[in-house]
Image (cartoon, rainbow, N blue to C red):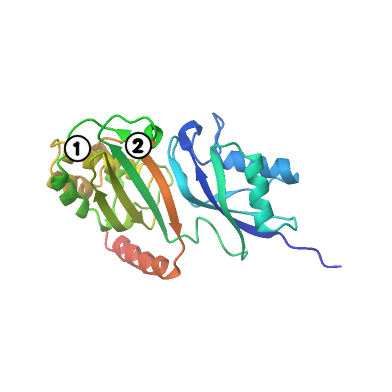
Amino acid sequence: MSESRPQRFKILIEFDGTDFVGWQIQPNGRSVQGEIEAALHKLFGVEPRVHGAGRTDAGVHATGMTAHFDLDKQIDAYTLRRALNAELKADITIREADIVDGDFHARFSASSRSYVYSVAHERISLDRRQQWILFARLDHDRLEEAVGRLAGTHDFKSFSKYVPDQTHHYCHVFEITWQRGDDVSRLHIRANRFLQGMVRCIVGGLVQVGRGKLSPDDLSNILAARDRSRAPMLAPPHGLVLTAVGYDQGDRTTISRIIDELQLGT
């Protein structure tokens, strides 16, 4: 009699990152990965590893985190999603679940990640845990000029935290826009990948430009320096939301070629 093969599940996750140490399991507190793995263990008596599309920092939120895991149980995706949501606390929700091919990988199959960072210009109560409340006036024209200089393929070492095993710091920014608003302004950014702390550092630099503490040229020079000691201020984590993970093989192939050529030229 042939044995059944494990099913690979792809899940779409929403979470409020306020009370988490981040996505990845750590010994000093709750993690999103750890909560989902614990729920699977309680439901099915197994200990599958849940692989996420990225590692969000403590306090960062998500509406579109993707993850996958293998489960040696014959269960349909709809039932699995409902069972997990019944077991998980209110700050994590499984929005979608699907059975996928065994070669799908939430992280390594991904071609892009999208984030939104929200900056509130007035005191707020309802969404205060998802927005950076900044009372200072911002020069949006200067800020929008600076935003345009970050699109494309660049070495973002100056806009990242130190990671010992980082092989290179090139990222391709497909889209980056500053959406100004009377009450809340938002940075929308989509790239093939993000370095640790990169979006928060970009937001911090843009806010410094908007407040007149840096010029758009200063931001370009910081980017070109490839030097962490030149890094702008780091925006707080709670304004940042991972909104989507893309899986486009064409994007992956094109960006890999561009980055390979840049590395050979350095």
Closest to the camera, between mark 1 and mark 2, is 2
- Mark 1 Cα shell of 10 Å, populated few (<14), some (14-19), many (≥20): many
Question: Could one spot residue 265 in this view of the protein?
Answer: yes
SS of the residue under disc 1:
helix
Is residue 45 found left or right of 26 in the rendered image? right
Residue under the point 68% across and 60% down: 7
Residue under the point 38% across and 58% down: 192
Q: Which residue is mark 1?
A: 208
The mark total stands at 2
Residue 6 lies, with reference to residue 125, above or below; the image says below
Question: Could one spot residue 162 in this view of the protein?
Answer: no
Residue under the point 62% across and 57% down: 9
Residue under the point 28% across and 53% down: 155
Please name the amino acid that badge 1 sits on.
Gln
Q: CA distance from mark 1 to mark 2?
A: 17 Å
Viewer-proximal residue, 86 or 213? Answer: 86
Q: Estimate the x, y position of residue 184 in percent, counting from the top left.
A: 28, 40
Q: Which residue is mark 2?
A: 131
- Image quadrant where one finds the C terminus: bottom left
Asked if marks 1 and 2 touch (Cβ < 8 Å), the reply is: no
Please name the amino acid that badge 2 sits on.
Gln
Viewer-proximal residue, 235 or 13? Answer: 13
Of the image marks 1 and 2, the number of the one nearer the N terminus: 2
Q: To which quarter of the image does residue 234 belong?
A: top left
Q: Estimate the x, y position of residue 249 in percent, counting from the top left.
A: 45, 69
Q: Estimate the x, y position of residue 174 in percent, counting from the top left.
A: 31, 60
Q: Estimate the x, y position of residue 224 in percent, counting from the top left.
A: 20, 50
